[in-house]
Amino acid sequence: MPAQTNPNQDPTKQPATNPSTRKSAPPHRGRWLGFGFGLAGVAMLSATAGALLAVSLSTTPLQQQKLTPEEAAVFSQGDMAKLSMKMPELTRPVNILVLGLKVLSSDLDGHPDKEQGYDVWQNSFKGLTDTMLLVRFDPQNQKLSVLSIPRDTRTYVEGRGEVKINEANYYGGPASSAKSVSGLLGGVGIDRYVTLNIQGIKSLVDALGGLTINVPKDMKYTDESQHLYIDLKAGKQKLNGEQIVHYLLYRHDNLGDIGRVQRQQLLMRAFVEQEVNVGLLSRLPKILSVIQSHIDTNLSVEELVALAGFATKTDRSSVQMLMVPGKFSDAKDYKASYWLPDQNAIETLVAEHFDFGQNTWKIENADATFLKVAIQDSTGDEAAVEDFVNTLTRAGYRNVQVYKDWPEPLDVTTFVAQDGDIKGAEAIRESVGFGDVLVESTGSLQSDVTIRLGKDWLSKKSQSGR
C-alpha cells in the first residue's frame, strides 16, 4: 500500500487579509513543525524533588501575554491542584492546549533581520501555529491522552470564518485558538494553555542532554533565506537541540502536514520513554529560567508541578497519542490544501478519550471482518511477513495489506491503534498471543490498526516449527 500524498499541499500560501480583524501583516507559513513535549519537559524538570527547594510554588500564572477578561474566561477558572505531602497533586482531569510556533524576523516587521541580513528566529508568541495539541491529564483513570490537531484542519475561526485552524493564534491569540479547538471537538472544555516557540524546544532538548530517536531516512534541505542547513543521516542516534529542530523543520515527505504530525508523535514517544539525566538536578533552576523565557502560559508553577507529578508516574502504555480524524481535501473542491475533519469520528474519539459527549459507536468485541489492518515489517524477513498475513487471515482478519517497512528493527511487535480504537488493536494482539499495544497515529492512514512486526514473531515461528 503506497503512502498517501496530498497533491494540494501549498505550504507557502498565506491567509487572506481581513481589514476588520487584521493586527499586522500575516507572517510566513513557518517551517518549524514543533511538538508538544515542551509542557511535559518543563513539568518533569519542575517536579524533581531536589529542584523544588529552589523553585517557588507560586500560584501566579507564568504569562507573557496579557489576556482580556473575556479572553481569560475562555479557560476554566477552577482549581486543579492541591498540596499533598508538600507536593502539588492534580485533583481532577484537565485539558491543556499546547501551541507551538516559529516566528521569523520578517514575520514581525516584513523584512529579514537588518544586522544579520537574513531571517532569524524571534522570541515571540504571535504567529501562525505549526503545532496544536490538546493534552488530557486524567488522574482518575491514570491516563494521559495527546490529541494532535493538524495545522491545516479546516474549521471555524472567530472573525475569519471557515479557514485553517492555525490562523486562530495569529488573529486572536491563545483564547481564539482554544475557542476554535473546542468548537472543532464539539464543545470540549479547555482548562489552560501553553504557547512554546522554537527556541524553547532547542533549549529544552539541550538541557536534557539530547534525545535519542530513529531518523527514518536521510534528511537534507537548504534554505538560504534563513541560513537553515538540514543534514541528518538515517538511523537511531542522539540528537542535540538544533538537530531535533532540524528533524522537525524538515518537510519533504509524502504526507505533508500529516507526516509532520506523525514525526511529532514519534518524538514525543521518544521523550516519554527516555530518562532524565540525574546530573541535571543541580542545574534545574537555571534550566527553568531559560526555558520559561520561551514559554507563555496561564499555568502556575504549582500547577505545572502537579501535571508533572502525574506525568512521571504514568505508565508508557497509558500515554495515548491521537490525531483529529479526517482526510485530505480535493483540489477540485478547495483553492487551498486542507485537512477535512470527520465529525462522526471526532464524536467517538472525544467520548472515548476525553470523557465528553456520548460514544454512539463503540467496539466492544472487535469484528475482524471490519478492521482494516496494515503490516509494517521491521525484521527484513519476507517469508515471516507472509506467514503473519496468513496467520491473521486464518484468524478471520480479511482486510490485511502489507504497508511500507518500518525503518527501525524492533524486538517486540507493536499493535498501533491508529484512530484510537484500542479494543480493536487488543483483539488482534490477543488473537496472535504476543506483542504490545500503543495508541498512536503514526501508522498507515488507511488502517484501523497498523502492526509493526518485530523479532518476537520470528521467535514464535521458530518455536512452532513453521
Image (cartoon, grey):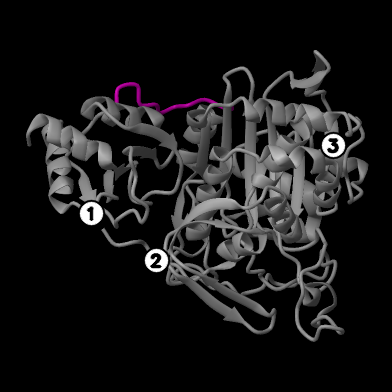
From the image, tell me which residue sits under label 1: 380
Q: Residue furthest top?
A: 85
- Disc assigned to residue 129: none
In terms of depth relative to the viewer, which is nearer, 51 or 256?
A: 51
Residue lying furthest left in this view?
465
Q: Amino acid at mark 3?
A: Ala
Instruction: Kindly identify the amino acid type of the residue bearing the numbered disc 2.
Output: Thr
Judge depth for marks 2 and 1 and give the one in front: 1
Residue 386, x across and y down, in percent: 13, 47
Which residue is the site of mark 3? 73
Q: For numbered disc 2, what is the local secondary structure? A: loop
Foreground: disc 2 or disc 3 = 2
Q: CA distance from mark 1 to mark 3?
A: 55 Å
Q: Which residue is mark 2?
A: 5
Q: Amino acid at mark 1?
A: Gly
Q: Position of residue 425 (x, y in %)?
A: 34, 32
In this picture, which residue range is highlighted in magenta? 355-366
- 273 is higher (above) or lower (below) than 295: above
Main SS class of the magenta portion in the image: loop
- Secondary structure state at the residue bearing disc 3: loop
Which quadrant is the C terminus positioned in?
top left
- Distance between the Cα atoms at labels 2 and 3? 40 Å
Q: Label 2 to label 1, Cα distance in Å?
A: 25 Å
